[in-house]
Image: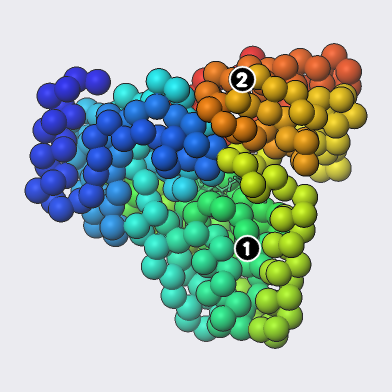
Amino acid sequence: MDEKKTERAAQKLAAAKTAFKREAMLSGYSSFKIGGPADLAVFPADAGELKNAFRILKEEGIPLFIAGRGSNLLFDDAGFRGAVVFTTGIDRCSVSGTRLTAGCGCTMTAAARRARDSGLSGLEFAYGIPGTVGGGVFMNAGAYGGQISDVFAGGTAINPVSGETVALEKEDMDFSYRHSSLARRGLVVVEAVFELQRGDRREIAARMNDFQSRRKEKQPLEYPSAGSVFKRPAPDVYVGKMIDDAGLKGTRVGGAEVSEKHAGFIVNRGGATSRDVRELIGIVQDRLESEFGIRPECEILTVPEIPEK
Ligand SMILES: Cc1cc2nc3c(=O)[nH]c(=O)nc-3n(C[C@H](O)[C@H](O)[C@H](O)COP(=O)(O)OP(=O)(O)OC[C@H]3O[C@@H](n4cnc5c(N)ncnc54)[C@H](O)[C@@H]3O)c2cc1C
């Protein structure tokens, strides 16, 4: 990146009192603990700062990537030439009747807790998913039979290029398995509204605790990862089982390892690079293709984007 552009953007962000860091190591902002430096990491505190940051980056012609908690991302070892805008400061959450409105940076777990505390059911599945509401809507995140599209009732987004604020309508979201229309539309979620149902607080809490203990039991939460690496090729086809059946558990490239505990996860056993992870992904895909005739597509996203083979 042009150093002068970065410097000017940094000055403008400082004048607007928006938090940022230069040469920020992305490994510090990724659940995988992988990633080199970004020219800029920007941390807007609210929707106004987010919009203003987009304007500044556009004025200076700086490429941008929007991230929540970086829990579905593989940042490159070389980092990102441009600005990564993290939404985690935009985390207000409120309840009115049976509707919960959450800022894009509110964690899914915090939103689920807030719903529980208000006696509202529908977000239990989101408890323990380590991402934000914005990332969850983008990915149509889901677990234990629930997904964002079940409860999404609308929201607000910004087009970072035009600066325009857009109302999100459910029918335009094209939700499907780990997919929404947001990537195609180039929109950044600012807040989302979830329509929930009244329920018994204790029963809601019990479901959340059950999901959490199942996570702890099945998932290698003791190591950095980005969750399930691959999408399910079909609703009842589990890639983790195929990887296990192919005898790939424990396969390592550098510091990256196919988890012994849950074969659908690749974990960082220490010092893993994005190159290690990509190589390991390739080994798994090649093997599943030759053994089962299925080449699973990645659920985790590489930043900058590297098209899959
Ligand atoms: C241990 C572990 C367990 C997991 N379990 C699950 C699970 O059960 N179910 C599941 O679905 N996922 C799971 N994940 C994956 C991940 O948590 C989800 O995909 C989550 O929704 C990502 O949210 P994030 O805020 O971290 O997004 P990021 O990883 O930061 O970004 C993911 C994508 O969302 C986009 N994005 C982020 N914020 C916005 C926004 N405001 N507007 C528009 N686009 C945005 C980014 O540009 C990127 O393309 C797991 C991950 C880990 C590490």
Front tag of 2 and 1 = 2
At 68% across and 28% down in the image, what residue appears?
257
Q: Quadrant of residue 239?
A: top right
Q: Which mark is residue 254?
A: 2
Q: Amino acid at mark 2?
A: Gly
On the question of residue 253 being in view, the answer is: yes
Distance, label 2 to label 1, CA atoms, is 32 Å
Callout 2 crowding tier (Cα within 10 Å): few <14, some 14–19, many ≥20: some
Is 158 displayed left or right of 9 in the figure?
right
| Residue of label 1 | 127
State the SS at label 1. Answer: loop
**Disc 2 vs disc 1: Cβ atoms closer than 8 Å?**
no
Q: Is mark 2 within 8 Å of ligand 1?
A: no
Task: Return the disc, 2 or 1, that comes first in the chain's sequence.
Answer: 1
At 63% across and 63% down in the image, what residue appears?
127
Q: Position of residue 222 (x, y in %)?
A: 64, 47
State the SS at label 2. Answer: loop
